[in-house]
Image: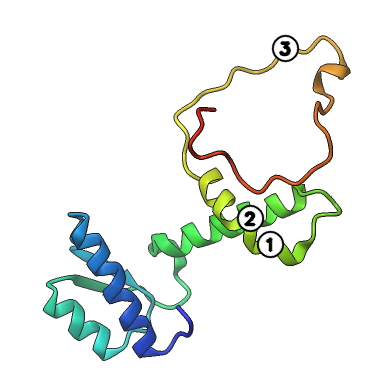
Amino acid sequence: MKSQTANSILKTYQKVHAHLCSAGLRPKLQRLDNECSEALKTYMKEEKVDYQLVPPHIHRRNAAERAIRTFKNHFIAGLCRANKNFPLHLWDKLIHHMSIDTMPQNEQYAPLKTTSLQDCAPHAIDGWYLGPALESYR
């Protein structure tokens, strides 16, 4: 979305709505920030999508706001873990990897039993990690 004008928001919502519907996931309820254009309200009524406006500054009622905050916190923590020589102007190349990394995993890890501090030492060479091999098994 290039801007946050009413027209741009409407066009983006229409694209997302069409994509969800084509996947068989027709939205029934939409929670929105306190600001919503009349055009968007009209479109949602035409598509039979109920909507609720969240009061201003009450982000705990809007799950999307919480998800955004969680992702930002995770992304910033990831940048802090990056190599000190990582070119920060390439931060946008990390978004896809961070998105994959924030997906919930159904794995459980047992605590490691270490016999020496050497067991906890890094076992790698210097480099930049920009994402997993998506077509390979872990």
Locate residue 44, reporting x and y percent: 19, 77
Q: CA distance from mark 1 to mark 2?
A: 6 Å
Secondary structure of the residue carrying numbered label 2: helix
Within 10 Å of the Cα at label 3, are there few (<14), some (14-19), or many (20+) other Cα atoms?
Answer: few
Locate residue 58, reporting x and y percent: 44, 70
- CB contact under 8 Å: marks 1 and 2: yes
| Amino acid found under the numbered disc labelled 3 | Lys
Residue located at (22% from left, 55% from top): 23
According to the picture, the residue beneath numbered tag 3 turns out to be 113
Q: CA distance from mark 2 to mark 3?
A: 32 Å
According to the picture, the residue beneath numbered tag 2 turns out to be 94
Within 10 Å of the Cα at label 2, are there few (<14), some (14-19), or many (20+) other Cα atoms?
Answer: some
Residue located at (18% from left, 63% from top): 28
Q: Quadrant of the C terminus?
A: top right
Give the mark nearer the N terminus: 2 vs 3: 2
For residue 95, which quarter of the picture?
A: bottom right
